[in-house]
Amino acid sequence: MSTLAPELHQLINQQINEEMSASYSYLAMSAWFEDTPYGGFAQWMLAQSQEETVHAMKFYHFLVDRGATVKLAALKAPDQAYTSPLEVFETSLKQEQHVTQCIHRLYEAAQEHRDYESKNLLNWFLDEQVEEEKAVQDMIDRLRLVGDNPVGLLQLDQEAGQRKPLAPTGEETA
Ligand SMILES: [Fe+2]
Ligand SMILES: [Fe+2]
């Protein structure tokens, strides 16, 4: 019998879905960029998608380690209709802000149930959300600055492309 409170157990299962949904959404954003000249942004979004899967797996393994059953729910089809790189990153920021709220809700539950191990796990996620929101906000600020200037956009794209995917993507790499 798991020592995890049922409420926390349920919220963590839900958070696995949130992280996988974020991963799926970033993958859709990456696919959108693949149909544009912005290969660097496509790569950035692919790396971000993989990171979100890693987040889901952190919660997954936490449940397993605590002897609590993992329950996976359906994923919704992500949005794939974007009109500009800026719109993609603005959507990404909203998504991250939503996830931050979910982590706060989880943290409150961990506090209520005095679950110190959950709080420890969630502390990592609090830091991670600060980093991710900042990274996306920085990109939004710079995209607003360059506006429709193709030279500026291609420069940001090239910079974004410096970010390498974390794990095998099923694609041959040199
Ligand atoms: Fe995440
Ligand atoms: Fe994230």
Image (cartoon, rainbow, N blue to C red):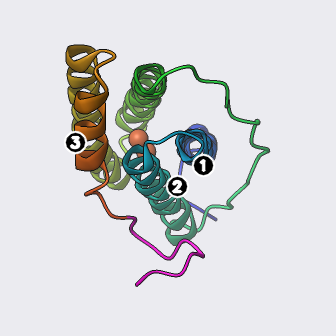
Look at discs 3 and 1 and give the one toward the viewer.
1
The residue lying at 59 percent from left, 37 percent from top is 7
Q: How busy is the neighbourhood of tag 2: few (under 14 within 10 Å), some, or many (20 plus)?
A: many
**Quadrant where the N terminus lies?**
bottom right
The residue lying at 22 percent from left, 47 percent from top is 159
Q: Position of residue 75 (x, y in %)?
A: 74, 42
Q: Can the viewer see residue 126?
A: no
Q: Position of residue 12 (x, y in %)?
A: 55, 46
Q: How busy is the neighbourhood of tag 1: few (under 14 within 10 Å), some, or many (20 plus)?
A: many
Q: Is residue 116 left or right of residue 159?
A: right
The residue lying at 38 percent from left, 29 percent from top is 100
Residue 99 covered by magenta stretch:
no
Q: Position of residue 109 (x, y in %)?
A: 44, 32
Looking at the image, tell me whether mark 3 or mark 1 is earlier in sequence order.
Answer: 1
Q: Is residue 19 left or right of residue 77?
A: left
Q: Which residue is mark 3?
A: 127
Looking at the image, tell me whether mark 2 or mark 3 is earlier in sequence order.
Answer: 2
- Magenta segment's dominant SS is loop
Q: Which residue is mark 1?
A: 20
Q: Can the viewer see residue 48?
A: yes
Looking at the image, tell me whether mark 2 or mark 1 is earlier in sequence order.
Answer: 1
Viewer-proximal residue among 69 and 21: 21
**Pointer 2 and pointer 1: residues touching (CB < 8 Å)?**
yes
Q: Identify the magenta region.
A: 165-174
Name the quarter showing ligand 2. top left
Q: Give the amino acid at mark 2.
A: Ala
Q: Which residue is mark 2?
A: 56
Q: Which residue is the extreme one toward the right?
A: 74
Mark 2 residue's CB less than 8 Å from ligand 1: yes
Viewer-proximal residue among 7 and 124: 124
Q: Is residue 102 above or below residue 32?
A: above
